[in-house]
Structure formats: structure tokens, C-alpha cells
Amino acid sequence: ARKLTFLTEDIATAQEPSVSELRAYYIENQKSYIEPVRYSFRHRYFSNDWREHAKNDASAALEKIKNGTEPESVGDSFMLQTTFIARTADEIAALFGQEYSESLSELVSDDWVGPLQSAYGWHLVQIQARTQVRPLSFEEARSLLVSDLALERQQAANEGYYENLRDRYQVVQ
């Protein structure tokens, strides 16, 4: 069965789709080609492993920052970077946890806020930039369109081939 699948896939993808086919596919599936919200932020980390009262220490540090203390002078060292640029909510969730990622959508840019809990401990966070959800242009989505259309054609070729086989044979019990 796998050899037959390879055969139909090769046939289905033998010809590169034309620009007009890609444009039609793009228009038909435009909701699938969206640039998600992206966050650029920096954070200060407070470890539950190294501190008895990490959340309280983070709250106290936030007050110090609001009163002029340099943010870099508070918190614990962190195994990842302290600044993240243009990360999606899914990327942030993979690093810090879903709850942390969801919290970012509620934050105002430029203000230090917190403490926010992550999978690692507590954080003070400053959103430096946030992009809005937007549709990808045809050119931005082009490589995705080529691969998605090829996959769709492969699946259709496989389904058609197997349907043809089923129609030609009778299963006897």
C-alpha cells in the first residue's frame, strides 16, 4: 500500500502549480494564512528553587523598578535569554507555559508588570512591542501555498486511486 501511495504522490506532484492556481488556492484558503500576534518582551526571573518567597521577592522588585531601580539589577539568572523578539503565543507557551503566554495578551506595552508565574518560577515582564494579527500577503504565503496545494493534490490522488481500486474489486467473505 505504501508503494502505491508513493506512486500516486509522485504523479500528483509532478507538475509545479501555476501562479493562477496558487492565487486561486490562496483566495479559497486565505483564512489559513494568517500572521499571528507576536510579542517582543523582556523579563526578570525569580526562582522558586533559589528563593523561599520568590513571588513576594518579585513583587518587591517590581516596586523597586517603579521607583527607579534598573531592572537588570533585580532577579535571578535565567537559563534562557532575558529578551525575546517577535515570538508568537505558541512559541512563548512552549517556553514558559500556557498561562504565562495567555497573560501577555492582557499586558500594556512599556510598563513593567508582574509577577507572572511560568513553568520555571515568577517573572516581571515588560512588553516592548506587539504586532496585530494580519493576513499574509500572497507573496509571503507563496512557499506555504506551494506545499499545501501539493499535499492537497497528493491526498486527492491517493483517495481517487484507492476508490478506483475498490470499485474494480469485490471483497468476498
Image (cartoon, rainbow, N blue to C red):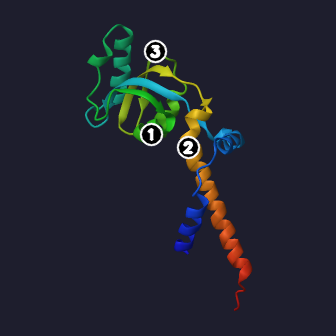
Q: Earlier in the sequence, mark 2 or mark 3?
A: 3
Left or right: residue 22 compared with residue 62: right
Dot 2 falls on a residue whose secondary structure is helix
Q: Is residue 19 above or below residue 129?
A: below
- x then y, percent, for residue 8: 59, 66
Calculate the distance from the C-alpha at mark 3 to the C-alpha at mark 1.
Answer: 22 Å
SS of the residue under disc 3: loop
Mark pair 2, 3: CA separation: 37 Å
33 with respect to 81 (left or right) = right
The residue carrying mark 2 is 144
Residue positioned 25% across, 34% down in the render: 50
Circle 3 residue: 111
Q: Name the foreground residue: 127 vs 12.
A: 12
Name the kind of residue labelled 2 in the image.
Answer: Leu
Give the label on residue 97, or none.
1
Work out how far the residue at label 2 is from the one at label 1, CA to CA, in angstroms. 28 Å
Q: What is the x, y in percent for residue 48?
A: 31, 35
Kind of residue at badge 1? Gly
- Residue lying furthest top: 68
Dot 3 and dot 1 residues touching (CB under 8 Å):
no
Say if 131 sits above or below 90 in the image: above
- Residue 115 percent coordinates (x, y): 42, 26
Q: Residue at x 72, y 86 (%)?
A: 170
The kind of residue on which mark 3 rests is Asp
- Kindly report which numbered mark, 2 or 1, lies closer to the viewer in this rendering: 2
